[in-house]
Image (cartoon, grey):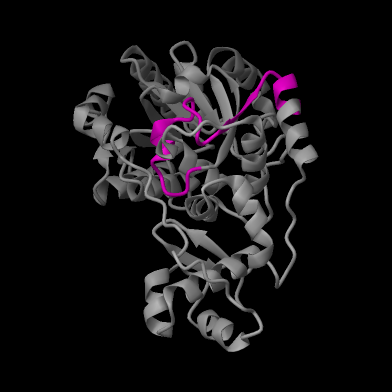
């Protein structure tokens, strides 16, 4: 990634990077925190046993990581580590950037300016036509279109941008077509565009993967356009994620009595940019928006300089921290203030709790319980 300076990475570095990325319970934020502290994935892997004494964690072997790389290459794909130049700069700018992505297709599209188009799976004919035309028009303006290969709006967006450049971001492995009915457009995107995923080869898409997939779509994009969304649509999660990432949120208005437009109409009411056509989008995709992402530096929060390892034998400290947590996100700074403990001690405890599967790291230096204690 761009923040690693001029250091040269070897094949062994990439294998260890992949091993750390695939290690059980280590999410993207903690991955980058470990790299920030230990400088290399190899050093971080060596340090993990000190943080995982409460519960052993599964770390893929060198052979397993090598096999994943070789299997991907054999299928004409690539595993792209976040330190490689081909890794998309716009995606690298988000706090929870995936440490690795698997790609099938033309990687040149990853570092062109992109716009996301997402929306209802149960889309109207007019909604699909609008998404197709909008994607086509964006392509004529030299923008790549990113979407999620879902039926409905996503499919229309890919079809409209197939000849000009499209990125399909999958919720399972990059080799797993979902839904199956999109096999044809998947094959066409592999030939003419690019398919990517942060998941390992062969991973089946499950419910919790889709919000993670959505943050990659929005992370790749200068802005994300929502075309039809009911009030409970996952596309509204994409809109919120885009806003949190500092990207533009666009929404296409619809008839007030159509539930498929209730979500997009609400977004416009709450400040999203109204889209009647390509002109409304281009007005906001200006040089300021582009430079905002291009110049953004990855700001990873490293582990405390002291590198203190929490001792799980002191159960009182863990219980005190646990009592402050819930399934709703809590700022780590608030936990430190409430506990009146050293930052290094709280960070060490939270890391061990994450490695044991009790908490998860979230953007904005926040944590939450994975399940209620």
Give the quarter of the figure containing the C terminus. bottom right
Judged from this view, the residue extending furthest toward the bottom is: 316
Relative side of 175 to 291, left or right: right
Can residue 253 be seen here? The reply is no
> What's the magenta region?
71-97
In the depicted view, which residue is nearer to us: 44 or 339? 44
Position of 27 relative to 120 (above/below): below
Q: Quadrant of residue 222?
A: top left
Residue in view at x 54 percent, y 16 percent: 106
Residue 314 quadrant: bottom right
Q: How many marks?
A: 0
In the displayed structure, 211 sits above or below 341; it is: above
Residue at image position (67%, 26%) is 181
Identify which residue, 112 or 282, lies in the foreground: 112
**Above/below status of 333 relative to 161:** below
Residue 112's spot in the image, x, y percent? 39, 22
**In screen coordinates, is 1 left or right of 14?**
left
Q: Closest to the observer: 98 or 7?
A: 7
Rendering coords of residue 297 (x, y %): 33, 42
Q: Position of residue 272 (x, y in %)?
A: 27, 44
Residue 333 drawn in magenta:
no
x, y (%) of residue 49? 69, 62
Q: Is residue 60 visible?
A: yes
Residue at 27%, 45% in the rendered image:
268
Say which of 248 and 267 sits in front. 248
**Is 214 situated above or below 351?**
above
């Amino acid at each position: 990634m761009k923040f690693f300076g001029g250091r040269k990475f070897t094949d062994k570095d990439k294998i260890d990077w992949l091993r750390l990325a695939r290690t059980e319970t280590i999410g993207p934020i903690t991955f980058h925190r470990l790299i920030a502290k230990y400088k290399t994935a190899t050093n971080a892997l060596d340090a993990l046993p000190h943080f995982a004494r409460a519960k052993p964690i599964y770390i893929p072997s060198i052979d397993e990581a090598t096999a994943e790389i070789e299997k991907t290459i054999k299928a004409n794909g690539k595993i792209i580590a976040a330190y490689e130049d081909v890794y998309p700069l716009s995606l690298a700018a988000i706090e929870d950037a995936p440490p690795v992505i698997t790609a099938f297709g033309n990687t040149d599209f990853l570092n062109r300016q992109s716009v996301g188009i997402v929306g209802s799976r149960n889309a109207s004919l007019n909604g699909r036509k609008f998404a197709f035309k909008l994607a086509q028009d964006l392509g004529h303006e030299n923008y790549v279109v990113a979407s999620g290969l879902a039926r409905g709006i996503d499919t229309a967006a890919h079809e409209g941008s197939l000849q000009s450049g499209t990125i399909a971001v999958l919720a399972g492995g990059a080799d797993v077509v979902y839904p199956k009915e999109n096999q044809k457009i998947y094959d066409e995107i592999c030939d003419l565009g690019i398919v990517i995923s942060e998941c390992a080869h062969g991973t089946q898409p499950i419910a919790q993967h889709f919000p993670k997939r959505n943050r990659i779509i929005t992370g790749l994009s200068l802005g994300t356009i929502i075309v039809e969304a009911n009030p409970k649509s996952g596309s509204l999660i994409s809109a919120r994620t885009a806003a949190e990432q500092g990207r533009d949120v666009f929404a296409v208005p619809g008839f007030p009595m159509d539930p498929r437009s209730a979500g997009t109409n609400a977004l416009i009411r709450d400040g999203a940019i109204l889209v009647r056509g390509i002109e409304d989008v281009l007005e906001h995709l200006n040089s300021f928006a582009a430079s905002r992402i291009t110049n953004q530096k990855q700001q990873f929060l490293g582990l405390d300089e002291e590198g203190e390892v929490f001792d799980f034998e002191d159960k009182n400290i863990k219980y005190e921290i646990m009592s402050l947590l819930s399934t709703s996100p809590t700022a780590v700074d608030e936990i430190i203030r409430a506990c009146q403990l050293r930052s290094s001690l709280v960070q060490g405890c939270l890391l061990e709790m994450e490695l044991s599967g009790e908490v998860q790291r979230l953007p904005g230096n926040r944590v939450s319980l994975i399940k209620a204690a």
